[in-house]
Structures are given as C-alpha cells and as structure tokens.
Amino acid sequence: MNASLSIPAASVAAIEQSPGYWSGVFKRFLRDRVAMIAAVVVLVLVLLALFGTYVTPADPYQSSMLKRLKPIGTEGFLLGTDELGRDMMSRLMVGARLSLFMGITPVLFAFLIGSVIGIIAGYTGGWLNTAIMRTVDVFYAFPSVLLAIALSGALGAGIGNALISLTLVFIPPICRVAESVTAQVRSRDYVEAARASGANAFAIIKTHVLGNVLGPIFVYATSLIAVSMILASGLSFLGLGVKPPEPEWGLMLNTLRTAIYTQPWIAALPGLMIFITSISFNMLSDGLRSAMDVKQ
Amino acid sequence: MSQDAIIEIKDLEVVFGSGSAAVRAVNGVTLRVERGQTVALIGESGSGKSVTLRSLLRLHAPKKTTIKGNIRVAGHDVLSLSSSALSNFRGEVCSMIFQEPLLALDPVYSVGDQIVESIQRHKGCSRAEANKKALELFERVKIPSPERRLAAYPHEMSGGMRQRAMIALALACDPQVLLADEPTTALDATVQIQILLLLRELQKTLGLSIVFVTHDIGAAVEVADRIAVMYAGQIVEEGDVRTIMRAPRHPYTKALLQSRAHGSLDRGQRLATIPGAPPDLAKLPPGCAFAPRCTYAQDECREGTIALISLGESHSARCRRTDVTHLPHTESVET
Amino acid sequence: MRAATPLLDVRGLTKHFPLKASPGNKSGVVRAVDDVNFSVMRGETLGIVGESGCGKSTTARLLMHLINPTAGEVIFEGKVVGSRDLPMKEFHRQVQMVFQDSYSSLNPRLTVEASIAFGPQVHGVSEKEAVKRARDLLARVGLEPARFAGRYPHELSGGQRQRVNIARALALEPRVVILDEAVSALDKSVEAQVLNLLLDLKQDFNLTYLFISHDLNVVRYISDRVMVMYLGQVVEMASTDAIFASAKHPYADALLSSMPSMDPDQRTEAPPISGDPPNPINPPSGCRFHTRCTFAESVCSSRSPQLTSIDETHRVACLMYEANVQHPRSRVNVLKVAA
C-alpha cells in the first residue's frame, strides 16, 4: 500500500515523475497474449490497407475468361481466381483498404460526434439530458442492420452515402455509453471539488471529465469497428455500398456467391477475412478494456 | 477463569497471492477464546483482524489463499472440514455478522423467509416450528412489532433494524460462537450503543462466545472481556480489557490509546501521533513490524522474531522492550 | 464593531428534494434541511454533529452552492452570496471544502500537483505560479514535494490523499474551510496526524473551520462551538464546553450519552434512546424528536419549537425551554430563577 516507505527521500529537489496512467495500461496490455496477437493481426491488416497495392502478386483488376475460378494453389494464383479470373490473393490484399476504411471511418466519426453529444448530455443532466437521450432512444429502437439499409437506401448507393448512414447508425450507441460514463464521473467528489473551486463547466469537462471518459468510450468504439465492417459488407452485398469492380470483401462475398458450389473455398475467403478482422478488433478492445481497468 | 477453550487458533498464517506480490495478511496469530467470553480484536485497516476472523469460518477463496496453522472451534478442526461439514459448521456452531447487513442479507426474500429457510435447512423442522422460532428470535433481538417486520424486505428496514435482523439470522441455528466483523461501524451513534448493549445481553443470556472485530476502542470496551491488539498481521498485545486500557505495555497499544481525541484533552492541545504509516504487508521488515515507528525501538528490535512475553496472568505483549514500556516516556507524547 | 459581524451568516437555509412517485409510495419531498439559521465567527471552529439523515452534509453542500437551496441565503462578510456584491466565483475563492472520501475526491488521471494547481488557474493564476503554490502547499501539509508532486492518487495512502485534499482546498487561499467528515475514513493513528495538521494550518492561515463529523470525540476536541442537528433542523447550539457539560435538548443529551465509555468499569448500562432516527421523508409533526423523546407531551406533536436563547451563547429548540408553552416540565422558570 505504502510504497513511499521504501523509497529513500530525494535529497535533490527534482520532482519524481510517476509513470503515468497510460504507461501502466501499456504495460498490462503487453502482458496480455491474446490482445497482443490481435494487435499484430490488426497491424498487418492496416499495413495491407496502406501498402497492399504495391506488393500484390498480380493486377487485381486484370480479368481473364480462361482462368475463371481456379482452385487454391493453382500455379501463379496462390489463392485461386474469382468468377472473372482475377487473382484472389491480390484482390483480398487490396480489398483490405476499402474494407478497413468502411469499418473504421464511420466509427471514428460516430466516436467524435457521439462523444460530444453524450458528454454534454451526461454532464448537464436535467431536461437537456432527457431531450438528447430520448431522441437517441428513437434511433436505438431500430435494429442496426435495418437502420443502415434504410438510411443507405434513402440516401442512394455509393461509398459516401454508406459512410454517412453507418455513422448515423453508430452515433446512438456511442452517445449512450458516453452519457452513462460521464454521468458517473460527474458524481465523483473531484468534479464537485472542481465546481467548488469556481471553475466553469468548460474547464471542468476539459480537465476532469475528458481524461476519465474518453478511454472507456474509445474502448467501446473499437468493439464497433467489427460491426461496422460487417454492416458495410452487408451494404456492399446489397449493392448499396462499394461498386464493382472495386475489391471490397463484402462485395467480393456477394459476387462469389454464384461459385459457392463449384469453388466453396474461394467463395468463403472474403468471409474469412471479415471474420479474422472483426475478431481481432474485438479481442483488441477486450484487451484494452482490461488493461485500462485499474484495480486498487 | 480457566474454563475450557471454545476457540483455539494456533500459529495461523494467511497469505494472499504468491511470489513477490504475496500479501502476508496474518503472520502467526495464536488466540484462545474461552466459552462464554467476548474477545475484541482491535487494530487499524490492514492489521489482519478481519482476515483472522474470516479464517474461523474459512471464508477466503481457497484458490488464492494459503492458510497455515491450526484452528479449533468447539472441537471442530476448521481447516480440515469437508465442504459439507463446513456448511453445517457455519451457522450451527459458528456464525457471523457483518458491517453492512444490506450486503449480507438477500434483497429478494423477506427477512423472515431467510431466517425460516436457514432454520429448516439446518434443523430439518416443520415450517410452522421454524416460523415460531423466527418470531422468538425477532423478539430476542428487540425488533418492535416483530410479526410485521418478519415480512419486511431488507431495504424496507432502517439501518439499526437490519443489523438486528442480521443478528437474528446469525442466531437462527443456535450457534455457540458469534463472529462480529465491525457490526456497529456503519451505524449512527445512538443506534450503535443499542446494538452493543444487545450483543452484551445476548452473550450473557445465551452463553455465547463472541469474537468482535473493530477499529473503535470505545466499542470494544463496551462489550469485550478481553482485548487483542493486532498490528501487521500479528497480535501484539493481549489481555483483560482493564489491563489493556489502564496498563498497556506494547508501544503500539500505548500510542493508539494516546492518539485518540478524547474528552479530557484541552482544545488546541496537540494529539500524540504515531509517525509514519503501517508497513507494506508484501514486504514486511525483519524483526518487529512496528519498530520503524516505535519510540522505544532499539537495534535488537529490528532482527529475528519477536516472542510473545507473558506479563502476568492473561496479559502478554510481543515486544522486547516491555521492561521499560510501563514507564512514562517523554518522547512518545509530543506537545 | 468588526468583531461582532459574523464571517458567515446562514439565514433560513432550506432544501427539499422532490421524490418521484413510485408504487406504494406517494410522491413527496425529503426535507433534508429545513429552515436552518446559524452564523460562524471569524477564526472559530464550528462543529456540526448529528446522525445520518440529519442534514449536516446537505448543509455543507448548500453552503458551497454545489446544490441550489429551496429557500434561504448565505451571507459572507455582510454580502449576499451570488449577488452583484459577491459573485459565486469570488465566494468560492473564500470558502473551500474537504470531502470525506479521499480517493473519490481526487482525479485519478491527474498528478497530485496538477490537482492542487487546478483551482488557482481557474482564478487566473499562471500555470507556473500555480504549480509553485501547489508544491509549497504539499510541503506545508507534510508531503515532500520532490517525492509526491508527480504522483497519482492511487499511489498514496488514505492519510496522504487527505493531506493532498487539504492542500487543494488551501490553494485558493480561502478564509473558511468546510471539513465534511474529513477525518472519518482514516485510521485513528492517521486521524491524529491529520487533526494536528488541521490545527496548525488554522493558526498559520487564520482559517475558520466548519467541522462536520459524526465522531463526537473529535468534534469535542477541535470545535469551539457545536451545533447539533436532527432531521434537517438545528436542535441545539452552544459552546463546546457548555454542550458537553450539560446538553439541554433531550436529543443532544441522548446523542452525547451514546458515546461509548472508555472505562471498562463504567460501561453504558441502558441505551439513552431507543429506535433509529426516522426517515426525513414526511418527518414527525411538531417537534421532530417527539417520537423518540422521553419528555414528550401532547403539545410536542402539535407545535414546532423555535431555537430559543437560554443564555448569551446557548440556544436550544425544545418546547421545555420556550416561554408561554404549556409543557408540564417547562424549564423556563427554573432558568429565570437561576439567572
């Protein structure tokens, strides 16, 4: 409990800086094996998204009627070819870019917007809280898949509209988490003490609230990335998101579905990528959550 | 007063966790409680008093805890009881009341149902008999309008009533030993004294043996026959309540008694304090654990194990300097 | 006469919390604080005692304006708090508070130094200056700045954290510090250290304390005057010596007699009063204590007692001490004769 007894008094007046909270989180995270594996997978995926186009074994857009649906392990096509004879491996690698983009971007925007709304609602309380949270509840009432499809359908097909509709889908859940975390922090005595020092709401939120709520909201948001990817894939599958011939895992899953009986393994590959990515993000957020949980 | 012992704890050691992070919560506690006696274990947070008490019912999670030593309660070897024998032991031989009855009582059953259920499970009697017994218990713990209160849920009762209800539940199966873990700490002053007096009365009429854990010396003085003072997982002094209050010999007991704000102090007069803070139980110093804070400490105190020294009939202290600790010590009281 | 103006004057302070209607429970109000009047003189320590639900902590939060009063006003040095003469922010510079839970009252993400320096910065002190002040205060409360300034709350013990909280309260150079159960969660040996510190600080910084506690021994030790509250109302107010020597209100008397005896040969034989304090929702009519009072008469359930002076410093709210009240045990004439 009392570490101070074992530390000899510093004779010089230099201030001993304690390792901060985040370095503790980082240390605990490094010790979590599952989370580390997930982090490595996510890193690889991100690298693929950034540099995948430069290292593909073949041109992902080059189709060939003669080489359609070659099985995995075919000479020159390590993971076979799709229904238009394009190299699957290259398409999966390049597909990481759009798929991750569609997974991360809406969550990022929703994180920014939802946190602001939720923190305001949680900090102010009262009628403003009621007004905001009841509005959020209306959106919350629809299943997210349905909401995404409805919004996308109303806005029209295309990547931009898909991003907007997905962002709208994720604002309510993030807002709800932000509100409840903020309301908890607000009832802490240190916020009361800050109010008792005469600080205004802005200063209190900046110094005392943000640092304590952004972490938990962020962890929750990372768990939504997997959901977002799957929803985005779903939208592409329905023709509401990415348009062919762009490689995106959801869209690939859609176009390969005709080959499910002739080349089931190839048809399953984009699904496998979605699965690996989403589970990695989930593990990553689980690991973050437990690393951030300081037990006294 | 040399009757038969109902509780005998010998060299009890309780360690939580393992390796370098192991917390040595209890380091060799030996305690004897005679039948019909009330012993108060007093000490500050982290002194091991609650851990010792919980060991008597083996309430610690077995996977994370290493318990060594020997505990005998009314002829039962507690540390080697099988799990079915243990659940009979709990309640029938020895039961416990806690600081916060709201956490110890089940919120979804009425208090009466919980008592009746406990009686039926342990005694195997009919529901009508159990009901009658529950009513008797409520009368015994002086709950007003007991018939009505038996049907109440824990959250419907006030703090003092809940504590009485928990005592009734603990007494449901006629145990011989009652363990009390800070039972009055969360209560208001006017209620605390009522509960203390109730415990004293129950002890007398039922012939209970009570082990009472508290950090409040005043509460201990009201109920206890004997006081055992704990520090860093050891009993540092033990004796008759009068001896401990009037002629303490361990420097920690002396300092603890002097550091209290009490009526005879002048306003503005500084309180005697114990410098420093209790040691880290994961890295205890060699020798006496109190030596770093002790005004009497000498080099000999910082090595070896300190034995319990007998200072007369039923008074002992774990200190090498008891030859001087009864003399007034100028340094120990700063003014 | 400067000495006669109270530093802090509380008039008619009232807080009713509305209750939501629930099944089997009609909507109502919790009368947490009901028409509380008192004043605090410069340099004194006023102890506020009472049991849970008596409104002592709510009074503290009302004084700090952390919650808005239903009625009443707080006057600081003759100026109404929140008026143009004394804006809230300026008042908060003068009056600070220390909370009971030393852990919850420090931001876990801020170093000790940053927590203390926050207040001064709110009031326009530069960051550099605020940090310097924080380090000076750490040294003043007995925590070596070089070792403690950069630490986080979870790395400190309870006593050390409470010292940090005291330093934070002092960082604005206040004149009044409200200590709401500030030593209650500490172990006795640590409590003594913190009490000594509070005494020193009071002298060094010319502070005025409002010391709220349920621990009567501590209140007796530290306070000049004591105010006893019961169910949201003040029942007695007097100098510490007077109230501990002879409390006049039956509740105050019972509360003080409930202190455990420290003498094994003079144990308490019978509880001074029975039962628990009633719920502050729908408190008893008339005198709120009449349901537990051994001296209660029929008049007590119909008439609310007023806080009445029985001598220059001693005030009590009991019908037995009120003139023109038909209470069979009225003490009014007895006091008159004595005077």
Image (cartoon, rainbow, N blue to C red):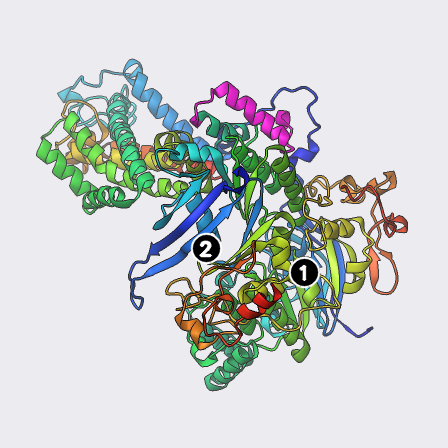
Q: Which residue is mark 1?
A: B218
- Local crowd size for mark 1, using a 10 Å CA cut-off: few (<14), some (14–19), many (≥20): some
Pinpoint the chain carrying mark 2. C
Residue B23 or residue A190, whichever sits in front:
A190
Q: Give the number of the disc on residue B297.
A: none
- Say if B286 sits above or below C303 in the image: above
- Element class at badge 2: loop
- Classify residue A232 as left or right of residue C98: left
Residue at point 52%, 20% (across, down):
C129
| Kind of residue indicated by mark 1 | Gly
- Element class at badge 1: helix
- Classify residue C22 as left or right of residue C89: left
Question: Which stretch appears magenta?
Answer: C122-147
Q: Position of residue C140 (x, y in %)?
A: 63, 30
Q: Position of residue B130 (x, y in %)?
A: 50, 82
Q: Position of residue B219 (x, y in %)?
A: 66, 62
Q: Is residue C140 magenta?
A: yes
- Say if C263 sits above or below B279 in the image: below
Q: Give the number of the disc on residue C55.
A: 2
Circles 1 and 2, Cβ within 8 Å, touching? The answer is no
Cα distance between the residues tagged 1 and 2: 26 Å
